[in-house]
Amino acid sequence: MIFDAHAHIYPDKLAARAVAALNGFYDFVCDGDGTYDDYTAACRKGGVEGFLLLGVATNAHQNRSVNAFVAESVRRAIAEGFHAYGFMGISQDIDDFESEVNVSCADGLCGVKIHPDIQGVDILDPHMLELYELLQARDLPICFHAGDHRPQFRNSEPPKIARVARLFPHLRINAAHFGGYTVFDDVGTLFSCENVHVDLSSSLWLIDRERALGLISYFGTERVMFGTDYPVKRAEDELQRFEALGLSDADAERILGENFRSFVIGK
């Protein structure tokens, strides 16, 4: 079974604006339109049977609505036959992290997504450390957007994620984008962090086969997960890039599905 460990969707009325903002922030053009229907159609076409939808909350005011939409989308996907999961977005502007976590978990979400650069918060902000402590105590995983080569965006540097991993050794962490979007030379600090997974989203189209295989070897195939970063890329195209790596069947099965289950579900 193939799982997509990294995807974002938006309400239909907001999707075009959200995708345009993403294109502007990263200076690329997303392949998808950001809607539930477009994403699930791409999953069916690519043979993806399960996925993780990630919420991103850029302010406290929108936090509940963002997470309610993710939870609603997860329920819809499950009803349509997908093995779907969702992570809540958490804004650093929330004073009471525990209350938001309780509400979203009760609504069916099972982890947290933080995009430090878009949210404008440093991973090591003292208030955020309170969130990580809570998640570790609750055995809930977290996905960080990781990395950016632009000097004005240093909130998600791989060494900062490594610091969090060492401060909270029982916290399950996904350092997205192979541990460092566009800063793949800096991800070595994460190799020894056994509680850190990485996903392949927004990575395979940026690096060559040899580089990708080298990073997989350093992290170990048991800590790498397949991901599309939809709407950035679609499942079919990313699976073609993944298959071009030429991994063994056993390694491919781990990355395409087994590692997702161990990270998200904790088994």
Image (cartoon, rainbow, N blue to C red):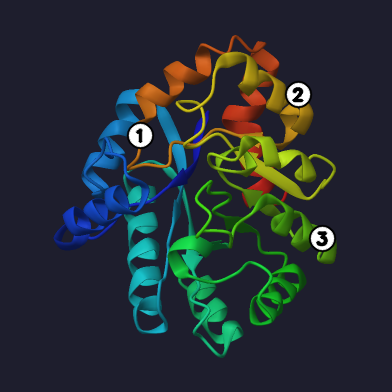
Distance between mark 1 and mark 2 Cα atoms:
24 Å
Q: Label 1 crowding class (10 Å Cα cut-off): few <14, some 14-19, many 20+?
A: many
Q: Nearer the viewer, residue 93 or 111?
A: 93
Could one spot residue 265 in this view of the protein? Answer: no
Residue farthest bottom in this picture: 95
Residue at x 43% of width, y 36% of height: 228
Q: Label 2 crowding class (10 Å Cα cut-off): few <14, some 14-19, many 20+?
A: few
Vertical arrangement, residue 9 with respect to residue 134, above or below: above
Check disc 2 and report its element: helix, strand or loop. helix
Q: Label 3 crowding class (10 Å Cα cut-off): few <14, some 14-19, many 20+?
A: some
Q: Which of the labelled discs sits on residue 217, or is there none? A: 2
Q: Nearer the viewer, residue 83 or 129?
A: 129
Check disc 1 and report its element: helix, strand or loop. loop
Q: Amino acid at mark 2?
A: Ser
Could one spot residue 112 in this view of the protein? Answer: yes
Q: Which of the labelled discs sits on residue 233, or is there none? A: 1
Q: How many discs appear? A: 3
Q: Amino acid at mark 3?
A: His
Mark sitting earlier along the chain (2/3) = 3
